Amino acid sequence: MKKIAVFPGSFDPITIGHADIVKRALPLFDEVIIAIGSNSQKQSLYSLEQRIKWIELVFKGEKKVKVESYGGLTVNFCEKKKANYLLRGIRSAADFEYEKTIAHLNHDMLPQLETILILSRLEYSSISSTIVREIIRGKGKVGKFVPKQIAKDFK
């Protein structure tokens, strides 16, 4: 059976923390689907097309990585893709508590779905798409918070 993991998020924009989680997860899975979800509670700064383009550029040549978008519940997307693993990055104790609750609910809805939590590297633990967007809105420099392949797009 193929080991497929879904790594869901808004990736608005993708950060070096996101990229690091995916790179560290690759040896564990046959395929990692970076799934850009539409979240009714979040207003995106960048278009879906732009976010897909950036992620594809960051993982160019990595055959195990696929990029897709979806709407609705992540658990339903996982079931549709026959993914038995949900990949999440953890930056803090608060992240852990939130992800634990979601993992339990997802498991109730799809018992074969296992959530895999990967701890953020210390140097990336303060980086989030939300903070990067605020720096962008404030006309700050974000080049060191996004993957080098896309940093030029933020100058």
Image: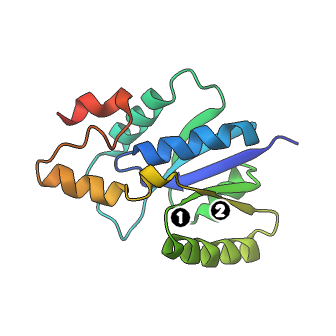
Q: Where in the figure is residue 60, as x and y percent of width and height?
A: 51, 24
Q: Is residue 15 left or right of residue 21?
A: left
Q: Which residue appears at 37% of the width and 41% of the height?
A: 51
Marks 1 and 2, how far apart at CA? 7 Å
Q: Is residue 20 left or right of residue 107?
A: left
Q: Quadrant of the N terminus?
A: top right
Residue 29 visible in rendering: no
**Element under label 1?**
loop
Q: Residues within 10 Å of mark 2 (few under 14, many from 20)?
A: some
Please tell me which residue is depicted at 62% across the width and 79% down the height of the picture: 101
Residue 117 seen in the current view = yes
Examine the rendered structure and indicate whether residue 70 appears above or below residue 115.
Answer: above
Tags 1 and 2 in contact by the CB under 8 Å rule?
Answer: yes
Residue 98's x, y, as percent? 54, 76
**Mark drawn on residue 76:** 2
Q: Which residue is mark 1?
A: 72
Label 2: state its secondary structure. helix
Which residue lies at the image location 73% right of the left edge and 51% below the top edge? 83
